[in-house]
Image (tube, rainbow, N blue to C red):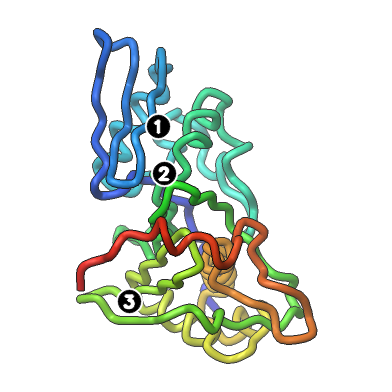
Amino acid sequence: MDGRRPRSLWSLRDDAVLEDVEGGRVLVVRSAVDRVRLPSPHPLVRRALDRMMLGPISLENVVDAPRGAFEGSPGTDLIPALPVVLATALGRLQHLVVRSIGLDDRRGPVLSVVPVCRQARFRPVLPPPQRRVRLSCRCRLTLRGADAELFSSTACHRVLLHRPEALLTTRMLQRCVTPAQAADRATAPLLAQAIIAHVAGAGMVTAFPGEGADISPLRDPGIFDQFLPRWPD
């Protein structure tokens, strides 16, 4: 069994742009989804966003924090663990921030959760170990080049599966499975749990009939279709 702990990575949407306005007193983060003004941005916020523009990063490197300072068990909401100024800014930018999982192998992210509407809010949600869950019937798994993608018309995120580990765990969710069973079957149990927590947090996992409603508390089915952009094939 591979016990390597997955790492949380942060970036901005690919179409995000940073703009200094009003003589540098306001930082604007702009994308096709929204335009957010950050007055008097703290240097830490500016440094983090500059690096997030380049791709997925560990925020520990931005603030020179000890390794693992901003990590937790799969399903942990990490924003409250960040320095207040950074947590406040990223909280306002949740609909523009891409959340990814990586490993310490320099092979890039395993999975990324990409916001696609202005209402997107995200935190990982790991179902109870013995709760039987599966992908929502509204969720579609497709291949897009080297990646696979999960998309649902009722979710505010799409999930990109960059590496085989993510695809294998997601395929387990095509049938009813408990998080404990998925971890037992995976070569990297902690990574499998983190993948499930991110897919569930994106609103794409449902409980087995009779065992509860949709897992993600941030998902509000049926109201987001009008905000979803059309993604090119």
In the rendered image, the quadrant that contains the C terminus is bottom left
Q: Relative to residue 157, is residue 160 drawn left or right?
A: left
**Who is closer to the viewer here, 211 or 69?**
211
Residue 62 badge: 1
Task: Name the kind of residue labelled 3 in the image.
Answer: Ala
47 left or right, relative to 15: right
Image position, residue 38 (x, y; %): 40, 22
How far apart are the two marked residues, 1 and 2, measured between alpha carbons? 7 Å
Label 2 – label 3 distance at C-alpha: 23 Å
Residue farthest along the bottom direction in this orientation: 175
Q: Pick whichever, 160 or 154, lies toward us.
A: 154
- Residue 61: x, y in percent? 40, 36
SS at circle 2? loop
Residue under label 2, please give it: 58
Q: Residues within 10 Å of mark 1 (few under 14, many from 20)?
A: some
Residue 16 quadrant: top left
Q: What amino acid is at disc 2?
A: Ser
Give, as a three-letter code, the residue at label 1: Val
Q: Left or right: 28 with respect to 150?
A: left
Asked if labels 2 and 1 touch by Cβ distance under 8 angstroms, the answer is yes
Q: Quadrant of the N terminus?
A: bottom right
Which circle's residue, 3 or 1, is located before the other in the chain?
1
Q: Position of residue 76 (x, y in %)?
A: 64, 53
Secondary structure state at the residue bearing disc 3: strand
Residue at position x 52%, y 63% from top? Answer: 202
Nearest to the eye among marks 2 and 3: give it: 3
Q: Would residue 224 be visible to someone looking at this image? A: yes
State how far apart marks 3 and 1 are (Cα): 30 Å
- The location of residue 122, given as percent across then percent down, is 54, 52
Residue, disc 3:
148
Q: Nearer the viewer, mark 3 or mark 1?
A: 3
Asked if residue 85 is positioned above or below residue 164 in the image, the reply reads above
